[in-house]
Amino acid sequence: MDKYNLNFRLENIFFKRCDFREIPSVIYVNRETLPENYSRYTFLSIWRLFKDYFWVAIDDTIDDVIGYIMNKIDKGRPLLCEDEHYIKKGHIFSLGVLAKYRRRGIASALFAISTKKMIDDGIKEVFLEVRVSNMPAITLYKGFKMKIVGEIPNYYADGENAYIMAAKKSDLIDKVTNIFEFLQNNHKIK
């Protein structure tokens, strides 16, 4: 773990696949942490179709969701895998951690767990959209060797542009696997 300079502080925190009953708490975390507020239907649709990639962080002292990651699998043209024409891609759709729990490694853990599951299911690359002003998120994703590969003008409802960031499976797999194994060995994944 040391080679990745990760500083996890996960006392009382564990990670699990999102359960249907936790959707209202996930929506609460989304509303508290991100300007992009999706409809209940969006959360439920992604949960129904892509449960294996929808994870939550739970603070067991309050027995509630304090962070989440919601992903889906897309198929289409690659962003980075130039030798391929049509691939299976992991789409990081939404990630949020309540403010008082930030800078403890929770977002990195959520990213690693869900990305490991997508890699295990055959994705060739991972991509996401992120606000151009969201430097903490951009820094997090760059830490996983994601690169800015494009920009979408006026992507968000308030008119802000989004960067498209992507990484090949081969660039992610070592760090993602090491974090996943660390979490598993420390009984943080349930």
Image (spheres, grey):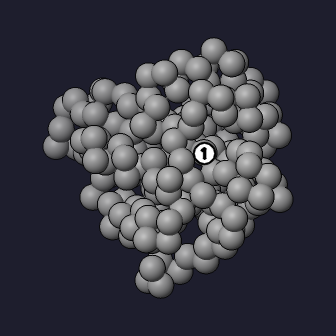
Residue 91: name its quadrant: top left
Farthest residue to the bottom: give it: 2
Q: Position of residue 133 (x, y in %)?
A: 72, 48
Q: Going by the image, does 85 lie left or right of 183?
A: left
Q: Residue visible at 33% across and 67% down? A: 174
Asked if residue 156 is positioned above or below residue 177 in the image, the reply reads: above
Q: Going by the image, does 122 lie left or right of 173?
A: left
Q: Residue visible at 68% across and 18% down? A: 40
Q: Total number of numbered labels?
A: 1
Residue 21: name its quadrant: top right
Binning the other alpha carbons within 10 Å of mark 1 as few (below 14), some (14 to 19) or many (20 upward) gives: many
Q: Quadrant of the N terminus?
A: bottom left
Asked if residue 32 is positioned above or below residue 179 in the image, the reply reads: above
Q: Residue visible at 74% across and 35% down? A: 25
Q: Position of residue 100 (x, y in %)?
A: 83, 59
Q: Position of residue 146 (x, y in %)?
A: 45, 55
Q: Going by the image, does 166 lie left or right of 99?
A: left
Farthest residue to the top: give it: 41
Amino acid bearing label 1: Val
Q: Residue visible at 45% across and 39% down? A: 53
Element marked by disc 1: strand
Can residue 109 be seen at all in this image of the molecule? Answer: yes
Residue identifier under label 1:
56
For the residue pair 67 and 163, the one nearer the viewer reads as 67
Asked if residue 181 is positioned above or below residue 68 in the image, the reply reads: below
For the residue pair 31 and 82, the one nearer the viewer reads as 31
Can residue 148 be seen at all in this image of the molecule? Answer: no
For the residue pair 134 and 17, the one nearer the viewer reads as 17
